[in-house]
Each structure stands twice: as C-alpha cells, then as structure tokens.
Amino acid sequence: MNKRQITLTVNGRDHEVWVIPSDTLLDVLHDELGMADVRYGCGEGVCGTCTVLLDGDPVNGCLTLAVQAAGHQVTTMRGLLGADDTLHPLQECFLRRGASQCGFCTPGMVLTSLDLIRRVGRPTREEIRYALVGNLCRCTGYTKILDAIEEYADQ
Amino acid sequence: MPMLNLRLARPELLIDINPADQRLPCVALSNSGGGLLRLPALTRHRVLLEHDLVRQHCPLLADAIRYVGNVRVRNRGTIGGSLAHADHTSEIGCCLLATGARVVARGPAGDRTIPASDLFAGYWTTTLAPAEIITDVLIPVARPRQGWSFHEMVRRTSDFAIVAVAVTVNLAERADRIAAANIALAGVADRVVLADPALLTSDPDETAARIAETLDPPDDVHASGEYRRRVAGVLIARALREASARAAR
C-alpha cells in the first residue's frame, strides 16, 4: 500500500510522518515516533494500555487510524509532564500510593482518570471504578490506583 | 476497527465517513405532544449519554448507553456504526426495537426508511443493500403515561450482554394498567428481537414466563441457552414493573 505523509501533533509538537493508511495511531506513536508510554495490550479496545487523548478525549490508539488523527491534538501521558519533566500531580499520587507496579497500565489509568476528574470534579469511588472498567491492571489489584486517584481529586 | 484487528473483516477498501456529517441531535415535536428525535448516524455514544434532548426524549437509550463499552469506546463509537454492525447483544438495537424507531438509509437510488424491526437479518448482518449507509435514526419521543426500563445481565461491567431487556409501556387512560408494551431482547437469538405483543398479560410474571417459553437462545462459552432463557424471564418481569412504575409517576 502507498505511504502518505501526514502531520501528527503530539504533546504540542508537530511530527511529519510517512504512514500507510491502515497504520493505527498506536503503530505510529509507538513504533515510528518511539513513544513508549503508548502501549499495545489487547488490540480490541478493552484493556486501555494504548489510551491517548484526541482533542482532549480519551480514545484507543489501537482502534484509531493514524490518518484520522492528522489535524487533531494528540496527548500521551508524557504530554502531562511539566517543565524539566516534572511529574504531573496525579503521577505523584500514583507514586506515593504505590499505584504502579509493572507500570504497563499506568499511562492509560492516568489519562482516563484525569479526563473523569476534569469532567466531574470530585468523582465518587464508584464513579472512578466505572470510568476505569476499560483499563486492566494485572498487578496491584486496583485498590491503590483508586486511592491515588481519590487523593488527587481531593487536592 | 476491532473486527479488522481481529482479522474477522478484511475489506479491500475502507472509507472514513467521520468528516462527512457534523449535524447534532434534534427534535421535531407536533402539537399533539408526539414527535421525533432525530439522531444523525455519526452521533457518538458519549453524546447519547449526555445530550439533553436524548435524556429528555429517549431516557431509555441514555440509560442503556451506560452498558456500552468503556469511555474510549463511547468517545469514538457511533449509533449508526453500532446498528450497521448488528451485534445480537446490542443494547442500542434493543432500545430502538423497544421505542419503535426507524432508520434512514441512503443509497444510489435515494433515501428509504426502515423500521428497526426490519433492519436486523442475523449475526452481524443487516438488510441494508451493499451500497446503502445509515444516515439518521428516528425515535418517537417518550410521551406522558409511557414508561421505560432497561436491564442487563453481565458478569463484568462493559462486557457483551448475556441477556439484555429494553421495555416501553403505555398505561391505560385512567387506570394504572398496561395498555401496550414493547419488549425487546438482546442475547437470546441471532439478532435483537421483539417479543410477540400477543403474549402480553396484566401480570408481569405471567407475561415474562410466556415470552421466555418462546425463546430458544444459543449456548456459548458465556452461558447456556437454558440459563439465558431463565435470565430473560427474570429481567422481563423486573423491567415491566419498573417501566409501569415510571409511567404512573
């Protein structure tokens, strides 16, 4: 298939990339641009490890084609970092609460819960659980993740 | 897209219709209190969940969307895409049957309107012609003395439904007795189905038992057909009671 050149705006920076129309956004972010915080988990939209924000809304990188993201703002977890790569306050809460173990699910957890908090302010624990049904963690068992998100929402 | 990633679909050509239509949900009300809620096919699930017009005029659909996918799926998934996919466990398909909705399909010969009850042909198959696409969904607005209810049995939130039931009921003029009901079921056949209206009685348990008896759900790894039939009976009775209570308010 023919490649075409598109401009992807990721974390505020423009990237000129050559893509096949069938390349997913995940393929391009991870394999072409080397962004290790966007990850292949299930490939069918149920695990949440490929979560990115598209114009501010969480979407699955594995179910969005790269060409569909051209002309839109893409944000990965690294886009949340402050100057000199200081951690986002929600990431600090994850660290303090021990909410990351292997870390594979963490970017998806952070981006999805941040979207929830931006929308509703202080969600209940049950609302956080519901928002994260599509983010699987196989290490910590979720309790510490919920603790971390609640701590951030209380700030 | 999941069908592509799972290699279940291998299309030679894919057309992105996302930029083709920017319309929003709208409603046209008649003087008699009736009217239609018009949802463009590209209306995303998140909009169905949050839009005031949907919450007001089709609360059944706004409620049922909570069971669809997860937040990322609802940000990208559309009502037209879901209907054309024609999953036999579709919450949306179930709601359209229960509300007596119609879809507008556009092809080379122009537009035609298809009742939701004629749209689904079997597993992941619709009656759309190869060159037709869905452009709009038309839902009769909820009216006074009408109640609704949606219930779903799943093992984990956001899974495909084992059984789902969507119900609308209309109460009789001066008594809290059900005059008519649409009872739609998902997960019990090769497509979403409407129960035969002739099976309706004044007793929710009896109605549920009569409908369950007519079902012959398939067995799969998630549940046996017999289990699905029993769950369907329980959910139908529960939904009829809840819908009647809402209608009487």
Image (cartoon, rainbow, N blue to C red):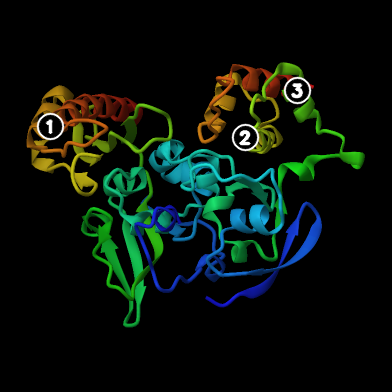
Give the image quarter of residue A49: top right
In the image: residue B186, left or right of residue B211: right
Task: Using the image, determine if residue A88 lies above or below residue B99.
Answer: above
The answer to whether residue B18 is left or right of residue B141 is right
Check disc 2 and report its element: helix, strand or loop.
loop
Q: Which residue is mark 2?
A: A104
Chain ID at mark 3: A
In the rendered structure, the residue with mark 2 lies on which chain? Answer: A
Q: Is residue A89 visible?
A: yes
Q: Position of residue A71 (x, y in %)?
A: 70, 65
Location of residue A23 in the rendering, given as x and y in whole percent from the top left corner? 56, 63
Disc 2 residue type? Phe
Amino acid type assigned to the residue bearing label 1 in the image: Ala
User: Is A73 drawn above or below residue B229 in the view shown?
Assistant: below
Question: As drawn, which residue projects farthest toward the bottom?
Answer: B109
Kind of residue at disc 3: Leu
Q: Percent x, y for residue A107?
A: 67, 37
> At x 64% / y 28%, what residue is drawn?
A102
| Nearer to the camera, B136 or A46 | A46
Q: Nearer the viewer, residue A73 or A13?
A: A13
> Which residue bears the numbered disc 3?
A95
